[in-house]
Image (spheres, coloured by chain):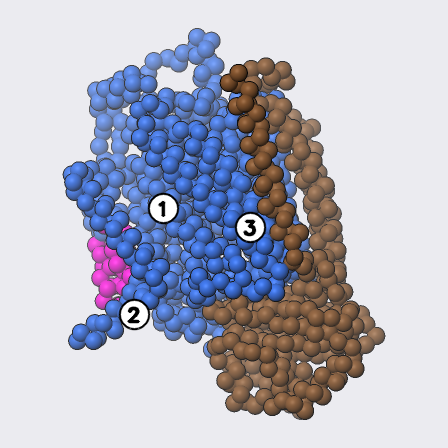
Chain colours: A blue, B brown
Amino acid sequence: MLERLKEFASEFFVTGDPLIYGADVAIGITMITIVAVLTYFKKWGWLWRNWLTTVDHKKIGIMYIIASIIMLFRGGVDALMMRLQLAMPNMDFLHPEHYNQVFTTHGTIMILFMAMPFMFGLFNVIVPLQIGARDVAFPFLNALSFWLFFLGAMLFNLSFVIGGSPDAGWLSYPPLSELSHSPGVGQNFYIWGIQISGIGSLATGINFLVTIIKMRAPGMKWMKMPMFTWSVFSTCIIILFAFPILTVTLALLFLDRFAGAHFFTLDLGGNPMMYINLIWMWGHPEVYIVVLPAFGVFSEIVSTFSKKKLFGYKSMVFAMLIISFLSFFTWAHHFFTMGSGADVNAFFAVTTMLIAIPTGVKIFNWLFTMFRGRIRMDTPMLWTLAFIPCFIVGGMTGVMLSVAPADFQFHNSYFLIAHFHQVLIGGVVFGYFAGLYYWWPKMFGFQLPEKLGKWAFWTWNIGFYVCFMPQYAVGLMGMTRRLSTYGWDTGWWELNFVSTIGAFLMGVGFLFQVAQIADGIRKYKTLKASGDPWGGRTLEWSIPSPAPEYNFAITPRGDDIDEWWEEKERRAKGIYPPEQPLEPIHMPKNSAIPFIMSIFWFIAGFGFVFGWLWMAILGLAGVGICMIARSFSYDTDYYIPVDEIKRTEASLRGSV
Amino acid sequence: MNKKPRSLIRIIIPVVLTLVTIALIVWPMLAGGQYVVLDPKGPIGASQRDLIVISTILCAVVIVPVLILSAVIVWRYRDKPDNKSAYEPNWSHSTKAEAIWWTVPIIIIGLLAIVTIRYTYDLEPSKPLASEKAPVTIQVSSLDWKWLFMYPEQGIATVNTLNIPADRPVKFELTADSPMNSFWIPQLGGQIYTMSGMAMTLYLQADHEGQYWGSGANFTGEHFAQMRFDVNATSEEDFDKWVNEVKRQSQPLTQETYKTLAEPGTSNVAYYSSFPEGLFQDIVTKYVVDGQSAHSKHGEASGAKEITTQDVDKSAN
């Protein structure tokens, strides 16, 4: 009995690597600390009522962002471990097997569990405020989306200590990811972690589409919507069409692995190329899903910090919609070298290049928003200004990669790695950082200390170029991606060594950001922000910071693109809107079901990962019961009385 | 008095930082390593290099002015109390200006698209190279985690080392008996995937004798980093001499040794005096069900040349 238990434990837990044991200890200590702190300060009730069961879009947004920053840390540590392994030739820091796990989890986490939730966090915090709504269209679904994402991400991360991490690359091409070549449970963690959070992503996409279509303030016609809201709208359209592809693809892969199907196997008529096509039919739109909201953030910031209207609004909207359309017709450029023939390659090369046109137009419009403006260099604007040259260069190398016959030489090399990190870090990460700095006062009611923010900005940026410029060069020297080691005879070590220095500089930049946030929290009383700390232009700046739970005491109007700016102009001239009487506000009630249901999904996922059918069925039954319970709960809303609104408004407005 | 040194430091620090950053980036780019992609030794690689240069120039035509323009705009319109440049907070539309920046990228991308399409057809990997000499055929199979090269015309086989005659086209037929890899010899030309259940064709040529290297460019699992191989381009005479030497000095590759070889693991360089007839076709058709290749729907006209059982039958006849 004891022997069997021992055998089970040695397979169940990841063993043998001191790094893992170190991580085990760290995770254990962190969890014990959290429990101890919550108990000591008697905060369990607060946690449950204010966070775990909340349906408030602002709080859900904050939870998304916290989770994504933790994931940024995890993905970042993965990156640093890889860079350490590659710093010198023939390094023995990570074994190949371990290295393969690290780059797989790095990619998966950064895209699906860092970029996506960061993006959803910004959606949640800002979109309802920007369109003058009191919440999203489906607040309950919104909470469910978050918890599905969160527990999906946790399931994926669990593979680090239990069962073993996936190691077939972030897109898990079969046959490598099939049972024949990856018999362990790592791939199952990959499939179920992504599936569970993927349901959440799809639901969020639908939620925000409906919110934007149905819940805009009176007067806010389509062409009066703020640019960030437009970007969210474009992105949600892509999510709506792309995420089902991912779900189906991974479901088929799961059937192959679990039920012995042959969709993507080599034998019995399976076809791995089908998987590669399908996964990129989601994968390519996915990069536009994450980058379009960053474009939206930049549009808001450029206009605010140049004290000028956004240039070429119509062009901007049109460009964004073209990008979301074209994003579905470029997927095959990820495998020009599959031998699909000149016709196919020529088509996908041209569609890929076409995307450069609307993107280029957007860059020009941002530049001409600044032209004849007055540019202030606060941290949100600094990240925006760093984005522009970075994205121009990254875009240029993207066009170079789209030239199909030339791509035969770039494909799978570090040139490609440098390119997509330049657009994903320079575009997406810089964009979300800019957004976080921009809307931080709106979320928390205080400003972040600028000085540490500038330190973070400069170390991140210098680190970025030092890390990735050499990678373009080493790509032209023939270094391919995912190599766990290389020899002295390759001539690659100088470039790799410097690249590693750059990566660690970015790590230091991240530490500065953590310090900045910690310092801000410590001094938040002296850093209190008004409702409109940056001289904002859109509706979210017309209410106090942080926003009250009902957002707007009186439903605002949205007659202008820069409604709040115009309103301030009118007020300066002495024209005030007529007083409107307060009315009771209809709000959704908190619910524990999203959290509980997601736990059941987690249990079901864990069961499927290990092939324990009883556990999977138990989990799915729990999910079903939660759904039934929800459909029979009628007490899901309440009204905030006028008195309470008056009191809240008085205390909020009085204190600023 | 206090102010002066501080402002000096405020200038020195950024300047030093910028210089250190540039030095850090530029030094390794100039040190040691060889830019194999930009230093091609064969016609395919040379065309691809030309294309890289053309596309870089076309892009740079737009990008360099835009980068300069960005810097100028940011500097000129920064928010300083004594900034005398124009400020027009409501200027947000100009049909003329927007027409320009819709048109310029369209023209540049149009040009690039024309060039790309022409080169895509010219450099289609399965297209034979123009040459007076008949191509030598080499059958390539990627295994976990080594390369097997079979020379059907010479009747020999090698592992993790490749010899080719210089100045003569080489017709690579490629497949895999493992997860998908990619066959890449940067100095001769671009890569192509090796996939189980099908054969691809790639024509390359080394114009000059010399030693080059190739690698597996697509991740295939644990020891994928060990899939580098040397490529020796020699004169015809030396190539023949080498073939004879291999024939004389090494053991044959049998079905049994192949089985062992195909098992996951790394391998040293190895030479075989012969290989089982039809081994390549056997690998390609390994997964054929009911006389139909798994992927037989893909057109023969494309780069992915299919070898169905019919082809195999023909070669058997």
**Label 2 residue SS:** helix
Furthest-top residue in view?
A574
Furthest-right residue in view?
B132
Q: Chain of mark 1?
A: A
User: In 3D space, how far apart are the residues under numbered discs 2 and 1 (Cα atoms)?
Assistant: 27 Å
Q: Nearer the viewer, mark 2 or mark 3?
A: 3
N-term-proximal mark, 2 vs 1:
2
Q: Amino acid at mark 1?
A: Ile
In the displayed structure, does residue B237 sit left or right of residue A386? right
User: In 3D space, how far apart are the residues under numbered discs 2 and 3 (Cα atoms)?
Assistant: 39 Å
Point out the stretch of residues depicted in magenta.
A596-625
User: Is residue A402 visible to the viewer in this orientation of the structure?
Assistant: no
B210 w.r.t. B243: above or below:
above
**Residue labelled with disc 1:** A70
**Residue labelled with disc 3:** A498
At 56% across and 44% down in the image, what residue appears?
A465
Provide residue A91's location: percent of width, then percent of height.
49, 62
Q: Chain of mark 2?
A: A
Is residue A591 found inside the magenta-colored segment of the image? no
Classify 10 Å Cα crowding around label 1: few (below 14), some (14-19), many (20 and above).
few
Disc number placed over residue A11 in the picture, else none: 2
Is residue A612 found inside the magenta-colored segment of the image? yes
